Amino acid sequence: MKRIFSVLLIAFLLIVPVLTAHAEDVQYVYADEDIFTTDELETVNARAVEIANDRGVGIYYFFLRDVEDVSSYLKEFAKEHVVEENALVLGIGAEYRDFLPVGPIAEAVFSDDVCDGIYDAYNAVKGDPERKLLTYLNEADSAIEAYFNGESTTSASGEADTWAVPAYIARTDGGKPTLVDKERLVSDSQAETLSKRLKEIGSAYKCDVVIVTVPTLGSKTAEEYADDYFDYNGYGYGATPNAQGTTVDGDGILLLLSMEARDYWISTSGYGITAFTDYGIQMYLKDQFLPYLQRDDYAGGFDAFADACEYLLKTARAGVPYDYRRVYVDGWSDAQLLSCNDRAESVANQYDVGIYFLENLAITNADAFCADFIERRTFEVNSIVLVRGANGLSIRTAGAVANAKFTDEVLNNVGNAVNPYLSVGDTKGALTAYMDKCIAIVSDYGHVLTNGALSEDALSNGNIRLKQLFEQHGVALYFLYDADANDPQALAADYLSSGAVYEGNAVVIGTTASGSGVAVRGDVAKEKFTDRKIKKLIKEVDTYLPGNVGGAVDAFAERSESILNWRPVNWITLAISTVAGLLFGTAPANGLKRQLTSVSKQTNAEGYMQPDSFAMTQNSNVLLGKNTTRTVHVVRVESSDGPRGGGGGGGFHGGSSTHTSSSGGTHGGHGGKF
């Protein structure tokens, strides 16, 4: 069938006057020779050339009476003669007419309703073929202009076919509407307030922020529609539209909602790709507005989207885009950052304490940035964050465990380890010193706390002992000594409930100059450390206090080990086992013994050998066996208010993944259903 159409097309073209309109010899008007004069063809073709040069969209026309299947013929015609990426072809044949939009712009501009309106205007002109065709060209040109300006196109009746931008809608710095609510999801007053807010955010952070709602995606995916809408409607802060009104790689973010299947897509471009990272979109931005959309609160959802965009742009412009990275240094390559982040992530996975290092001189207030970062952007409950900005250094901690490990004195030591490197501009050295210091502190078991009563060696030995017991039995042991405390029981209980003790099963002994007290948590620990055993434990520890804190630590460890190793004897089970052994073991053994009549009892193994049957040249007694070590695998289950999700992994490697749109622009983004 296609071959027939091609042959037919060539035959017609041989009899149709050919008019050279411009340098590329593009012809836009094809018709039977009795329809237009040569002058008329020149006039209408010149107008088509003008539109193509101004808009980048070719407007083609043919009137060929012998064509019966216009729809199929249109495709062959476009393949042979349309030279632009975007074009509209009106074909009229023997019985009916049809339109064919070619390319993403044409498909977006020339909907069925728009084409019907163009044809109505064309058909309303009678008796003047030249004016009739010029009407078609001018109506198509008006539709393109209206689309680029974000305005409505109208049918012959004057009724709007698409959403018209109200005058009160605020526009971007490039003159484009910040809100295009074709589905009327918000009221007029809400739309006005929202559009102004989007305008303010875009102007303040030099990045267009746009929301678009449409009834359907047509033949496109949500990603394609959002990307094309951004580019072909001239969005993007600082971008200059070409003659067709298209922009490429302008700075911005666009939220698209399609109500037909409840699709959404967030399209980012230019600086928007930097500010709105994959992690920032998927782990922060969408969580802010999607819950509202899912319950059809569109005004609330759009407001939440605006607020979240403002925060992400603010933190990006301050120097550190919202990302999963624990280490961020302005100017470092992705490879450098990834290597450092791998080390920080391994520490977080092993010790559940996040270590963060952020440096960017665009941060004007390091302390404020550090406080905000540790509140919103750390993944773990326990973390330490160092921020270096233009005004100096700030270090903060969060979480009971991190706060207990990183006391004020320890934080000063961390700062003292880092500052010599920063003072000479050696960020790599500063980061290495910071990580080494923090890892040493985090990995230190630190369950013996004596307020300086023990030497470092004694503390280390005590912690090693308690750590070994935890690994073997799954019960954490803490030893506290405070000579100034009055109530050792309260000392132990307060520490256990403070959050510094993170294990599920734990025993804390609080010691003072006057004595000891014990607090216990967890079913396993309570089963082992009964009241009677705790009394014996306290009695042994107290014999060393207050003069010998080291001896008290040793006594606590030894008695705790004895308690943890003890297994209760079940006397009933023991009695049953004994009787069963006598009944089922003794009788068979005696029966077998009576059958052994061929040999007599000997004093050594050689006595059971027949003479001259075996020659042994060397012998020794060897115990065959192996040593085994039992390690308890402890699984820590976080509560519902535990660490924020994320961390490395989850497919995130920092920054944004990108793709190329039909305009040739680069876009990032994410989408789904709502």
Image (tube, grey):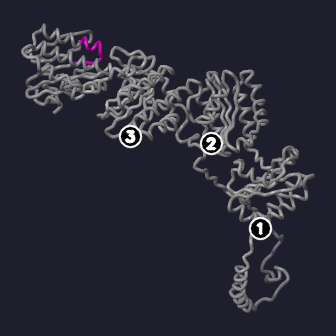
Q: Residues within 10 Å of mark 2 (few under 14, many from 20)?
A: many
Residue 308 appears at what percent x and percent y?
50, 32
**Does residue 507 lie above or below 315 as drawn?**
below
* Disc 3 and disc 1 in contact, CB within 8 angstroms: no
Q: Tell me the amino acid under the disc marked 2.
A: Glu
Mark 2: secondary structure? loop
Q: Of discs 3 and 1, which sits in the foreground?
A: 3
Residue 566, disc: 1
How far apart in space, not on screen, are marks 3 and 1 (Cα)?
Answer: 61 Å
Residue 296, disc: 3
Residue 527 visible in rendering: yes
Q: Is residue 503 left or right of residue 308?
A: right
Mark 3: secondary structure? loop
Q: Nearer the viewer, residue 40 or 477?
A: 477
Q: Residue at x 38, y 20 (%)?
A: 176
Q: Tell me the amino acid under the disc marked 1.
A: Trp
Q: Which residue is mark 2?
A: 380
**Does residue 327 lie above or below 166 as drawn?**
below
Residue 76 visible in rendering: no
Task: Report the quarter where the N terminus lies.
Answer: top left
Residue 569 appears at what percent x and percent y?
74, 74
Mark 1: secondary structure? loop
Q: Earlier in the sequence, mark 1 or mark 2?
A: 2
- In the image, the segment drawn in magenta is 49-59
Q: Of discs 1 and 2, which sits in the foreground?
A: 2
Majority SS type along the magenta span? helix
Is-magenta flag for residue 529?
no
Residue 142 appears at what percent x and percent y?
24, 17
How far apart in space, not on screen, are marks 2 and 3 (Cα)?
Answer: 33 Å
